[in-house]
Image (cartoon, rainbow, N blue to C red):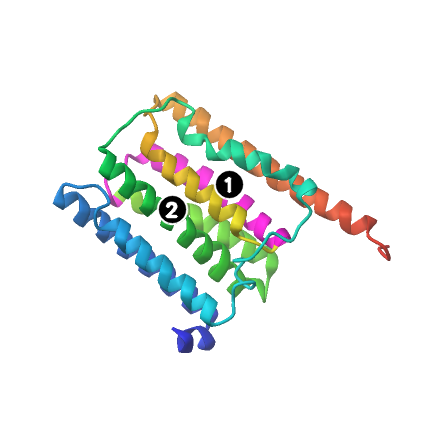
């Protein structure tokens, strides 16, 4: 991995994206064929997350990819309270035990790993690879790519409308997470929020089509509004900094 990374960071990021999507899709299919949800996906997720985490640590790239403490002013981020709201998304329509206790544990484990992997890959590897040449383009590509990546759900049997809605709000949330990383230099708030959102999906109650549309619109509004707040507060702090003109 080191040789590929040193040769081209963008190619390295793309390889991880493709590998992640293919590996988890196959793992989900195999799990379903065995009749136990996430029975293969969970160990695949743990192994993949460990490989990426240990490689980043070994290469002394933890701060580069945000695996460090948050460096911004918590007040400028509203103390992350909007993230608490996002975390509860999958419980807005009620709570239910949808699968067996064993499958619930496997689902939570795999989703925690997905949260880590997607943040490090899309917000870390991909964003940083493009950031060097064009920061604004890096923010846009990282956000949209993350949203479009959910098209793979169609291959796993998801309906068209829910997938389109997911692409929309995932892009908005991706934009928010990218802004948090860009301004705060840490992926930890994003990893934690992403992992919790994904994990709680196992307890979600399916809503009507209108409910899904309203929920998606709310997620987009919260994410984009919060991101713009962070950008505004960051600019004000820069303008008020000693020596600023």
For the residue pair 205 and 104, the one nearer the viewer reads as 104
Task: Give the crowd class for mark 1: few <14, some 14-19, many >=20 residues within 10 Å.
Answer: many
The answer to whether 87 appears left or right of 133 in the picture is left
In which image quadrant can residue 163 be found? top left
Q: Earlier in the sequence, mark 2 or mark 1?
A: 2
Q: Gap between marks 2 and 1, in whole Å?
A: 20 Å
Quick check: 61 left or right of 201?
right
Q: Position of residue 190 (x, y in %)?
A: 51, 47
**Which residue is identified by label 2?**
112
SS at circle 2: helix
Q: Quadrant of the N terminus?
A: bottom left
Taking depth in this image into account, of 214 and 98 the one nearest to the observer is 98
Query: In the rendered image of this protein, does residue 204 appear above or below residue 7?
Result: above
Q: Main secondary structure of the magenta part?
A: helix
- Name the element at disc 1: helix
Q: Nearer the viewer, residue 173 or 43?
A: 43
Q: Is residue 185 magenta?
A: no
Seen in the picture, residue 89 relative to 2 is either above or below; the reply is above
Q: Position of residue 238 (x, y in %)?
A: 77, 51
Q: Which residues are magenta?
A: 155-184
Which mark is in front, 2 or 1?
Answer: 2
> Residue 171 colored magenta?
yes
- What residue appears at the point 60 percent right and 54 percent down from the top-left corner? 182
In the picture of the structure, the residue carrying the numbered disc 1 is 172
Q: Tell me what residue is drawn at x 45 percent, y 38 percent.
A: 168
């Amino acid at each position: 991995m080191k040789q590929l990374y040193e040769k081209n960071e963008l190619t390295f990021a793309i390889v991880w994206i493709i590998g992640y999507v293919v590996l988890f899709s196959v793992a989900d299919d195999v799990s379903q064929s065995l009749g136990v949800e996430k029975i293969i996906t969970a160990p695949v997720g743990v192994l993949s997350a460990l490989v990426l985490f240990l490689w980043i640590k070994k290469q002394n790239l933890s701060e580069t990819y945000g695996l460090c403490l948050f460096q911004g002013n918590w007040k400028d981020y509203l103390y992350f309270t909007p993230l608490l709201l996002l975390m509860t998304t999958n419980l807005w329509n009620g709570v239910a035990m949808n699968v067996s206790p064993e499958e619930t544990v496997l689902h939570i484990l795999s989703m925690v790993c997905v949260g880590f992997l997607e943040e490090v890959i899309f917000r870390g590897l991909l964003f940083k690879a493009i950031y060097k040449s064009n920061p604004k383009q890096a923010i846009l590509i990282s956000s949209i790519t993350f949203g479009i990546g959910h098209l793979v759900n169609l291959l796993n049997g998801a309906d068209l409308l829910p997938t389109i809605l997911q692409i929309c709000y995932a892009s908005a949330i991706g934009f928010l997470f990218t802004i948090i990383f860009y301004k705060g230099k840490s992926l930890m708030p994003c990893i934690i929020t992403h992992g919790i959102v994904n994990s709680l999906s196992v307890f979600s109650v399916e809503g009507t089509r209108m409910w899904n549309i309203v929920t998606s619109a709310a997620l987009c509004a919260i994410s984009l509004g919060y991101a713009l707040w962070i950008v505004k507060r960051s600019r004000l702090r820069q303008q008020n900094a000693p020596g600023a003109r």
